[in-house]
Image (spheres, grey):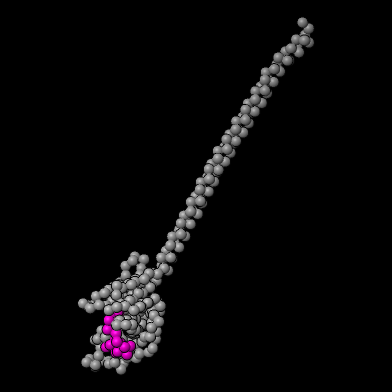
């Protein structure tokens, strides 16, 4: 064999391992790139799936929040309706009824029988969220009474003035007040002629009393409202009661 041919064969045989190493490097590099791409793609897909899942969860929470807000607004409307609605108290006798906002309550002392005689007596007090009401006491009370003792409005005024003095232990026998300390002016209650009696500052108890008296048939109706300053009674108490009261003819 010619020497030049031998040299070429030897050179070719030496180049083959080198080429193979390059091929191996390329393959390994290609595989590494494939693995890297697969890892990146897998990470992206996982993150995308997680983000999509979180997006669905957020959407569900937003829907639930909207439903909760809607339910809360509904409850607010129900509470507002309950607070701004009205109720009517109608005693069993005297032809009397009173419609009040639900922010008030009625404390009944007598409904048909007042100390052995026909009669009605109750007080109007503020209601509360706990549905527990307490008596305001004399200085800020609103008291409604009915008794079958009416003859004339003039006689009713004198009787109420005397009753008011007796109620607070005030009278000529005590040297503290008499009928002349009262004044009566004309007014209207439930569409009927009535009188408003004021005590003209006799003392700290009678000084702020407003007493309304009206009669129909045999029944005399008396509404006593204490207007003492800084009392806990609502400012619109008198207006609310006078606006809500209804009186119709009733048998004795």
Give the image quarter of residue 155: bottom left
**Residue found 73% across the figure and 15% down from its top:** 12
The answer to whether residue 82 is seen in the rendering is yes
- Which of the two residues, 182 or 4, is positioned nearer the viewer here? 182
Seen at 55% across and 38% down, the residue is 46
Percent x, y for residue 208?
Answer: 34, 85
Specify the quadrant of the image occupied by residue 207: bottom left
Q: Is residue 49 above or below residue 225?
A: above
Tally the numbered discs: 0
Residue 200 spot, x, y in % from top left: 34, 90
Q: Which residues are magenta?
A: 145-162
From where the camera sits, is residue 224 visible? Answer: no
221 drawn magenta: no
Q: Nearer the viewer, residue 221 or 229?
A: 221
Report whether 137 appears left or right of 77: left
Quadrant containing the N terminus in the rendered view? top right
Q: Nearer the viewer, residue 100 or 9?
A: 100
Residue shown at 32% from the left, 67% from the top? 132
| Residue 205 falls in image quadrant | bottom left
Which residue is farthest top? 1
- Magenta stretch containing residue 148, yes or no? yes
The residue closer to the viewer here, 143 or 46, is 143
Q: Residue 215, how many percent across, how many down?
A: 33, 83
In which quadrant is the C terminus drawn? Answer: bottom left
In percent of width and height, residue 196 lies at 36, 86
What residue is shown at x 40% (from left), y 78% (from top)? 243
């Amino acid at each position: 064999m010619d020497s030049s041919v031998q040299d070429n064969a030897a050179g070719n045989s030496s180049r083959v391992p080198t080429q193979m190493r390059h091929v191996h490097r390329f393959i390994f590099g290609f595989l590494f790139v494939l693995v890297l791409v697969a890892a990146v793609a897998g990470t992206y897909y996982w993150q995308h799936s997680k983000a999509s899942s979180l997006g669905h969860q957020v959407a569900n929470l937003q829907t639930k929040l909207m439903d909760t807000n809607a339910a809360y607004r509904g409850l607010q409307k129900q509470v507002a309706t309950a607070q701004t609605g009205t109720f009517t108290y109608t005693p069993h006798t005297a032809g009397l009824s009173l419609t009040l906002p639900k922010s008030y309550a009625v404390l009944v002392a007598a409904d048909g029988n007042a100390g052995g005689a026909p009669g009605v007596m109750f007080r109007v007090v503020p209601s509360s969220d706990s549905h527990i009401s307490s008596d305001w006491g004399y200085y800020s009370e609103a008291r409604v009474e009915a008794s079958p003792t009416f003859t004339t409005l003039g006689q009713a005024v004198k009787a109420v003035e005397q009753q008011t003095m007796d109620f607070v232990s005030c009278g000529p026998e005590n040297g503290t007040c008499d009928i002349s300390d009262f004044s009566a002016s004309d007014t209207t209650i439930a569409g009927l002629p009535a009188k408003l009696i004021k005590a003209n500052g006799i003392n700290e108890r009678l000084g702020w009393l407003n007493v309304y008296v009206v009669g129909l048939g045999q029944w005399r109706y008396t509404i006593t409202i204490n207007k003492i300053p800084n009392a806990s009674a609502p400012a619109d108490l008198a207006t609310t009661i006078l606006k809500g009261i209804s009186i119709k003819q009733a048998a004795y």
